[in-house]
Image (cartoon, rainbow, N blue to C red):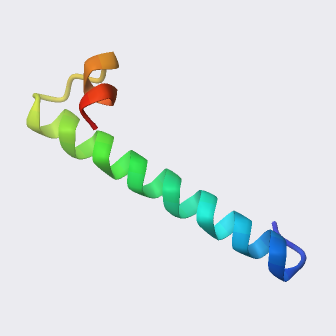
Amino acid sequence: MPTNKRESLIFTIIMCFCMVLWMSVYNVARVHGWSFGSGTLADA
């Protein structure tokens, strides 16, 4: 866990990026019939 303001900011940015990426992959996989492959990741 972050211990100062700089680490907290970097941690927040990384977590936001990962959450947005995961939700994009989730939504694309849901539309394509729950297939998790390289095509799903490329479409997201």
- Left or right, residue 42 beside residue 12: left
**Furthest residue to the bottom?**
5
Can you tell which quarter of the image residue 40 is in?
Answer: top left
**Furthest residue to the right?**
3
Q: Residue at 82% x, 69% y: name it.
A: 7
Residue 12 image position (x, y, % from top left): 63, 69
Asked if 32 appears above or below 7 in the picture, the reply is above
Asked if 4 appears above or below 27 in the picture, the reply is below
- Left or right, residue 17 beside residue 22: right
Which corner quadrant holds the C terminus?
A: top left
Can you tell which quarter of the image residue 20 is in?
Answer: bottom left
Q: Residue at 21% x, 34% y: name it.
A: 29
Question: How many numbered discs?
Answer: 0
Q: Residue at 24% x, 31% y: name it.
A: 43
Residue 13 image position (x, y, % from top left): 60, 65
Residue 27 image position (x, y, % from top left): 21, 45
Asked if 11 appears above or below 41 in the picture, the reply is below
Asked if 37 appears above or below 44 in the picture, the reply is above
Can you tell which quarter of the image residue 32 is in?
Answer: top left
Q: Residue at 50% x, 56% y: name it.
A: 17
- Left or right, residue 26 beside residue 13: left
Q: Nearer the viewer, residue 7 or 35?
A: 7
Which corner quadrant holds the N terminus?
A: bottom right
Residue 22 image position (x, y, % from top left): 40, 46
